[in-house]
Amino acid sequence: METTTKKPELLIPASSLEVLKTAVIFGADAVYIGGEAFSLRAKAKNFSKEDMIEGIAFAHAHNVKVHVTANILAHNYDLEEAAAYFKELGEIGPDALIIADPGMVMLAKENCPGIDIHISTQANNTNWLTFRFWYEQGVRRVVCARELSLKEIKEIREHIPEDMEIEAFIHGAMCISYSGRCLLSSFLAGRDANRGECTHPCRWKYSIVEETRPGEYHPVYENERGTYIFNSKDLCMIEHIDDLIDAGVNSFKIEGRMKTALYVATVARTYRKAIDAALSGPEAYADILPWCKEEISKCTYRLFTTGFYYGKPDENTQIYDNNTYVNEYIYLGIVEETDAVGAKIHQRNKFSVGDTIEIMKPNGDNVRTKVLKLITENGEEAESAPHPKQALTVVLSEPAERYDLLRCKA
């Protein structure tokens, strides 16, 4: 079977209604979200029923799809509530459900038969026979295991029906455990990663203790600070969009359902530009890559790797000396509306009158501007905005529009 040349979908995560709207405006073809139950990001804000309804309506008005995650590995006591949840989702009407557990697949098919089912990466989808199995169950999209190379994905594409879609992660944090199925959090913290409560112990600092010398801690790596032996660099495929298209990937998925609007706007806008350029031809893609590489480094990350796509990762894909993010820009707020006075926002981080900040526009422009005034809800002028979520009108030296994002250098 020939490799598909259909335009790939850009699939962006959203932790809240605000972030969903940001993803839609900044270039997503589809957004994936979690409800208040059965999602593997229990610590994310997630969506209430009301927010989900509003978010889906907003996305659909902009011709963007919404996928809802229900990808826990369920226990017996989850099943009754899960059935009721799927009935509710059938009424709300998202475009697809992302599910890992075969039992949950059965419940979804019974209780909301009109909604597409996508098989999560948690289901360990590593070969074309697995894809074909799910196809025979009525599933038309499967998310690749992160452990697959592009060569393997291309081979899967050649062995599955043409109308079956392949979704693959192309950017974001990498899990140390196979297809994200981790026992570390449950063992060390009593919180089950496979039920949405991961404490990210792969980012903790570790040393070795020899059995006969208790209390003597030895670094795993030659560094007096210890080591973060499980701490992977972040995946970034911005320079390899053409290879992903050639392999037959239908949906390009960004990781990060606990990220801020700034992160989501940055990755959505950057990958939107990269994908569109790659589809235009090699020259257009080569021309825009320097801008893409610069922009993608402006969102939080732990250095970059291409993961498993070009072969098994080696020691160079790990970070041994720290677990911190590189954070070059600070999120100030998103323009909710404008009037004759200025831009209205709910401020996220402190900034002051006189600061030079940046207006980040969905079309790719970054406009430097000076903060001329800050006006509170009471109509009083303020010198700075120290309180998170404070409602403000910001008067800028350059015009801002609704949904523009304000940021400044860290």
Image (spheres, rainbow, N blue to C red):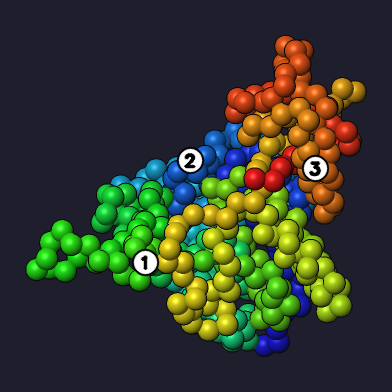
Q: Residues within 10 Å of mark 3 (few under 14, many from 20)?
A: many
| Three-letter amino acid code at the position of disc 1 | Asn
Q: Position of residue 256 (x, y in %)?
A: 56, 54
Q: Identify residue for label 3.
A: 359
Earlier-in-chain disc, 3 versus 1: 1
Q: Which mark is residue 223?
A: 1
- Callout 2–callout 1 Cβ contact below 8 Å: no
Q: Quadrant of residue 396?
A: top right
**Residue linked to disc 2:** 36
Q: CA distance from mark 3 to mark 1?
A: 41 Å
Q: Nearer the viewer, residue 303 or 44?
A: 303
- Upstream in the sequence, badge 2 or badge 3? 2
Residue 95 shows in the view = no
Q: Could you tell me residue 72's position as x and y percent?
A: 41, 54
Say whether disc 2 or disc 1 marks the residue closer to the N-terminus: 2
How much space separates mark 2 and mark 1, taking CA atoms? 42 Å
Look at the numbered discs 2 and 3 and tell me whether their residues touch, using CB distance below 8 Å. no
